[in-house]
Image (spheres, coloured by chain):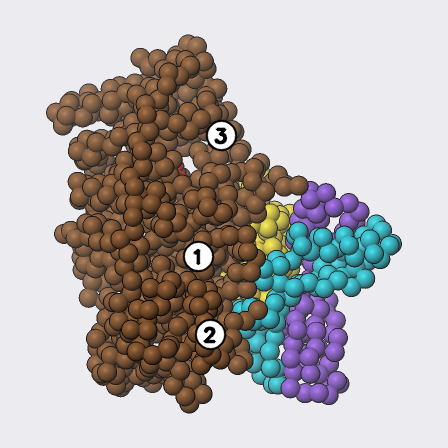
Chain colours: A cyan, B yellow, C brown, D purple
């Protein structure tokens, strides 16, 4: 089955990329952008079709590799 | 030879490029800040290496949208020679002045070392001082130098002989398709390359093989 | 998890303790304030009085280090040390640790460590032109080590490469004693005009205090306290204070600061490091004999509802505090806007010597500014000198010198660090003369023929065995590495990493190491101009190996008169300077081949170091040498192997016993391996004799093998394979 | 209003990061991972609360900056 893991910075953690993008959007005269925070997505294709199994495996993958849980949160959608 | 160097916040090999142009092409280049709207009439416009805007979002992406680019496009129409090195190459692809894209190195790590280049097309204003097939050392220092273009594009580039430099002797440091280290645009006036010729131009650097790029431009001017 | 407090909340004992202040220290605070401090005030005291900022355990001993010399312009006390390098130019350098943050989040911890040290250098008006990094990791088979190595290296590179400074040297060691507490020591060096140096000393009353750079967030709130707190198993809870580095902003900050300094607008400048706004403001006021008034409502914030406490303790990176010439305020503002940086007048200098802070219109702190620093506690902690280790027992004979050599050069500490150094840009700025791999990194001084050489050295296992000799050795090896490339050693910065100073045996290591460092600096005329102390490097009661990292800097009149370690010419004569090896105590051979760490550390004869080093330098400057390498870890045979690998040339040795581990792998000090052309050999040997330097011809460069005798020779290819192989193989492995 | 922009690599575009992650996951002995593709998310906070306006603005931002349409696709969710 196909799954998508989304990894985002925890609240309050500085996001230099997001800031730079905000600045650039402003320079490109896009109005009304309050804030931009950048994160990562991983589209993962798994052999299993069992949702629980998948969720368990993906959680482990996030904790071990995909997310830096010191500064990032992750969410899994199947 | 008159030249201009475009400077973006985060450019950091601008001083290296300025030194190379000054010492090898006989004149101090005009420095053009990214927010300026006109680039003076010169023989060569150089986009230096660095981490413009921290290379945030995508390497070169934000710089490629800065005000000065509008006039860079105008100069391109005019046929002014434009040289992009490293981050400059990334900016030129992001700006659509060169095809393809520069992705994260296959090894994922930043890589700084001296590789071997092969001069594949020496009938350009950027490479005429090299001998056809000449193999010479040149340093690289980048994180996103992995050249990619889709199959059709790649074929067009190869067919029209627009690969100027390739990584030679299995020294491809980043996974670039077809070992591409430097390419030319269709019209032949824009070159982008990942390696740093400006860092190999005096004895102190342990060699001068990088001079050829600049002496070629000088001769073409 | 944000620590937010009501500013007038009652100050409980727990609260005081949680700020790393003991009861005596709290009583001292009550005396100074004459009342119960507010929450913000207590936070300020905790930041100013923790080990990291106050040096309360180390001050007494740091004072004993020699800090003066003909080249010294500014010694310890400024953001970085400043030495004269002639032609009206100065070199500005310092080394600083970021150990705990790097263990918690290796990439950001290392990155912000590099950012911090670069800021220290350009705060003084110097453009950074070179960097080094000294790294100590746990045992390679510890489950965290690989992750920490890749994170730290990526962080060091990620920041330095983007900022645009060449990384030209460093060290990497692995040892189980760093398993729970790695060391990340970052060094930076910059060059400025002697009359273009800036300090934190504010002058003049009623001048604007200006905040520059990035916005303030809750990053690292409590970080300075954490950096001085021993780790325990609750480390997870200390996590939310991780700071994130932004090298792009730092690069803009560098350019903006240098541009601004050139306009004459800057009266005083101080970067915001540990406990950013607090330490920088107090430093500026106290050193200038002025008070500082801050209005926190003016501070650019990244997050909402930040408390005064949080703003005063925030360690958000890439920030500066300046006192500006009022008439040039607009010029300053324009420059900072041009570079896309925040600029805000957040206060003014006063004449009342108070540190006065208001927030939301109310006063949240009012403290005597001088006392905050001057009255910080200073301890004379009890210490016991470590027991000297007994002599080494009889060792089994050396079976196979070749095997031993291969084992040693493929061992974690001696294996090639190419996998690491290639992730660092060592060429940017176009002035690099010697890249990582030689005895010292060398960079030309822009626009001159001068070059600066730098090296980072310490041998922790020696310091563990004998902190005094170990301290001497660290300084001596730095001095030797500089001499080995032909530079005149000028001065050092020291980064003293030790365990918990409240334990007398650890304090003893610290004291004895400083005595050794001081002694070596005096004899070698190699003063300390800057430094940093990192204590409490221990986990669950186990301390790290005592690691006083020495960053040495030397000068060359002309980069062309420089030696490299690579064998250069077929037929060149190989000469050993210094006596044959005898000392195996604490040697790499003992540890890697025989498997134990025992015996005394090698003794350092500083007079001999001086004699031998001066001779080597003279010979290099006279152009008599074709290669030069100091003998350190692994002894003579390892030094020769390194020269062979670097030059892709072998050598045929003669008159050297292939069965004496002492001779081949002994780590006696004050020794070099040099090569000369056959014609020059005689003259060099005579000159050595005249200079009282033992010198012996031990071989001829040539072929593609390192040949000890008929029974023992190894191809240079094989040497390279094992030497280059270890680290990449290790890093591509996985922990299960 | 809050919006999320997801930018992913077009099919056929090589993905060094995705490949490397596949490799590490395998090395960490996670079984049954067929493929991993890495992309980016941008959490954007806009002044407007009008969905059409927002979508229009975000589309423009993607085309002008957030995505490199030579190699990337984007999708917008409000
Ligand atoms: N982390 C690092 N960064 C840059 N260079 C390094 C690093 N670690 C080691 N090096 C370089 O590798 C070479 C060998 O290191 P080392 O064995 O410590 O040298 P030495 O024994 O001469 O002090 C030196 O040139 C050193 O600068
Ligand atoms: Mg050495």
Q: Distance between the residues labelled 2 and 1?
A: 19 Å
Q: Which chain carries label 3?
A: C
Q: In which quadrant is the C terminus of chain C drawn? A: top right
Q: Considering only order in the chain, which callout, 3 or 1, is on the residue closer to the N terminus?
A: 1
Residue B139 image point, x, y percent: 47, 48
Of badges 2 and 1, nearer the viewer stands 1
On the picture, is C15 further left or further right than C677? right
**Mark on residue C410?**
3
Q: Considering only order in the chain, which callout, 2 or 3, is on the residue closer to the N terminus?
A: 2
**Location of residue C699 with respect to C561 vertically, above or below:** above
Q: How many marks?
A: 3
Q: In this view of the protein, which residue sits in the foreground, C123 or B100?
A: C123
Residue found farthest to the left: C690
Place residue C369 in its image quadrant: bottom left
On the picture, is C666 further left or further right than A42? left
Residue corresponding to mark 2: C310
Residue at 66% in and 51% down: A64
Residue corresponding to mark 1: C229
């Amino acid at each position: 089955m196909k799954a998508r893991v989304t990894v985002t910075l925890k609240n309050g953690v500085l996001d230099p990329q997001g800031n730079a993008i905000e600045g650039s959007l402003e320079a490109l005269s896009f109005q009304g952008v309050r804030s931009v925070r950048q994160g990562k997505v991983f589209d993962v294709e798994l052999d299993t079709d069992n949702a629980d199994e998948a969720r368990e495996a993906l959680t482990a993958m996030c904790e071990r590799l995909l997310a830096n849980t010191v500064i990032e949160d992750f969410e899994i959608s199947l | 030879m008159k030249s201009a160097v475009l400077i973006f916040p985060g450019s950091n090999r601008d001083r290296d490029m300025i030194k190379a142009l000054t010492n090898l092409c006989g004149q101090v280049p005009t420095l053009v800040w990214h927010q300026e709207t006109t680039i003076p009439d010169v023989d060569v416009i150089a986009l230096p290496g660095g981490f413009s805007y921290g290379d945030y979002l995508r390497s070169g992406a934000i710089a490629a949208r800065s005000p000065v680019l509008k006039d860079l496009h105008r100069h391109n129409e005019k046929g002014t020679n434009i040289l992009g090195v490293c981050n400059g190459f990334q900016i030129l692809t992001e700006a659509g002045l060169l095809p393809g894209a520069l992705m994260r190195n296959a090894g994922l790590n930043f890589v700084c070392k001296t590789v071997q280049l092969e001069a594949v097309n020496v009938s350009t204003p950027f490479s005429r001082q090299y001998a056809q097939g000449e193999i010479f050392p040149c340093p690289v220092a980048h994180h996103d130098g992995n050249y990619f273009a889709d199959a059709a594009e790649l074929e067009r580039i190869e067919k029209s002989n627009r690969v100027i430099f390739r990584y030679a002797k299995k020294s491809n440091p980043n996974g670039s398709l077809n070992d591409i280290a430097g390419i030319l645009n269709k019209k032949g006036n824009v070159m982008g390359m990942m390696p740093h010729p400006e860092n190999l131009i005096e004895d102190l650097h342990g060699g001068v093989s990088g001079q050829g790029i600049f002496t070629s431009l000088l001769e073409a001017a | 998890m944000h620590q937010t407090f009501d500013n007038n909340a009652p100050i409980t004992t727990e609260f005081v303790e949680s700020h790393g202040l003991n009861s005596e220290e709290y009583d001292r605070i009550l005396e100074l304030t004459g009342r119960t401090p507010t929450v913000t005030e207590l936070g300020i005291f905790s930041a100013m009085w923790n080990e990291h900022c106050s040096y309360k355990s180390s001050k007494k001993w740091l004072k004993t280090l020699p800090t003066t010399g003909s080249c010294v312009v500014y010694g310890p006390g400024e953001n970085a040390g400043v030495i004269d390098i002639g032609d009206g130019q100065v070199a500005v350098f310092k080394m600083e640790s970021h150990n705990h943050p790097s263990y918690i989040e290796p990439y950001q911890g290392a990155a912000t460590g590099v950012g911090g040290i670069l800021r220290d250098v350009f705060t003084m008006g110097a453009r950074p032109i070179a960097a080094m990094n000294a790294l100590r990791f746990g045992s390679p088979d510890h489950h965290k080590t690989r992750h920490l190595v890749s994170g730290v290296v990526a962080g060091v590179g990620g920041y330095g490469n983007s900022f645009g400074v060449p990384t030209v040297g460093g060290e990497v060691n692995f040892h189980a004693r760093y398993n729970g507490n790695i060391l990340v020591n970052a060094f930076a060096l910059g060059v400025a005009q002697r009359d273009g140096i800036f300090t934190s000393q504010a002058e003049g009353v009623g001048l604007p205090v200006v905040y520059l750079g990035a916005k303030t967030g809750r990053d690292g709130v409590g970080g300075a306290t954490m950096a001085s707190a021993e780790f325990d198993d609750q480390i997870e809870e200390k996590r939310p204070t991780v700071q994130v580095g932004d090298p792009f902003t730092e690069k803009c900050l560098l350019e903006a600061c240098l541009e601004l300094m050139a306009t004459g607008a800057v009266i005083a400048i101080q970067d915001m490091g540990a406990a950013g706004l607090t330490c920088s403001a107090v430093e500026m006021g106290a050193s200038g004999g002025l008070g500082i008034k801050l209005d926190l409502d003016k501070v650019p914030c990244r997050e909402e509802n930040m408390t005064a406490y949080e703003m005063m303790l925030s360690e958000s990176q890439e920030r500066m505090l300046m006192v500006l010439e009022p008439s040039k305020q607009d010029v300053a503002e324009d420059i900072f806007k041009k570079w896309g940086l925040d600029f805000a007048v957040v206060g003014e200098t006063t004449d009342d010597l108070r540190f006065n802070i208001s927030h939301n219109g109310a006063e949240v702190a009012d403290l005597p500014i001088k006392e905050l620093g001057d009255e910080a506690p200073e301890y004379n902690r009890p210490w016991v000198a470590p027991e000297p280790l007994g002599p080494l027992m009889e060792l089994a004979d050396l079976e196979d010198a070749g095997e031993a050599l291969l084992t040693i050069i493929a061992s974690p500490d001696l294996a090639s660090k190419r996998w690491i150094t290639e992730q660092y840009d060592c060429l940017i700025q176009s002035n690099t003369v010697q890249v990582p791999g030689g005895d010292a990194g060398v960079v030309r001084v822009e626009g001159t023929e001068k070059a600066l050489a730098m090296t980072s050295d310490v041998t922790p296992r020696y310091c563990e065995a004998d902190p005094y000799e170990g301290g001497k050795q660290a300084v001596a090896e730095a001095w030797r590495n500089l001499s080995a490339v032909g530079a005149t050693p000028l001065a050092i910065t020291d980064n003293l990493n030790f365990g918990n100073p409240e334990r007398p045996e650890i304090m003893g290591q610290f004291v004895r190491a400083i005595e050794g460092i001081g002694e070596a600096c005096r004899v070698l005329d190699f003063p300390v101009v800057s430094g940093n102390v990192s204590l409490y490097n221990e986990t669950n009661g186990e301390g790290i190996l005592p690691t006083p990292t020495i960053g040495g800097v030397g000068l060359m009149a002309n980069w062309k008169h420089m030696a490299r370690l690579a064998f250069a010419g077929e037929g060149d004569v190989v000469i050993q300077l210094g006596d044959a090896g005898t000392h195996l105590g604490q040697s790499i051979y003992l540890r890697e081949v025989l498997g134990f760490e025992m015996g005394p550390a090698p003794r350092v004869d500083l007079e001999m170091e001086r004699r031998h080093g001066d001779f080597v330098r003279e010979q290099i400057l006279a152009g008599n040498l074709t290669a030069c390498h100091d003998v350190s870890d692994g002894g003579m045979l390892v030094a020769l192997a390194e020269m062979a690998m670097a030059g892709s040339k072998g050598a045929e040795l003669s008159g050297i016993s292939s069965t004496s581990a002492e001779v081949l792998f002994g780590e006696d000090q004050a020794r070099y391996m040099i090569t000369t052309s056959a014609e020059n050999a005689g003259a060099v040997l005579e000159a050595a004799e005249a200079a009282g330097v033992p010198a012996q011809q031990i071989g001829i460069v040539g072929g593609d093998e390192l040949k000890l005798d008929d029974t023992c020779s190894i191809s240079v290819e094989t040497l390279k394979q094992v030497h280059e192989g270890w680290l990449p193989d290790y890093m591509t492995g996985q922990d299960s």
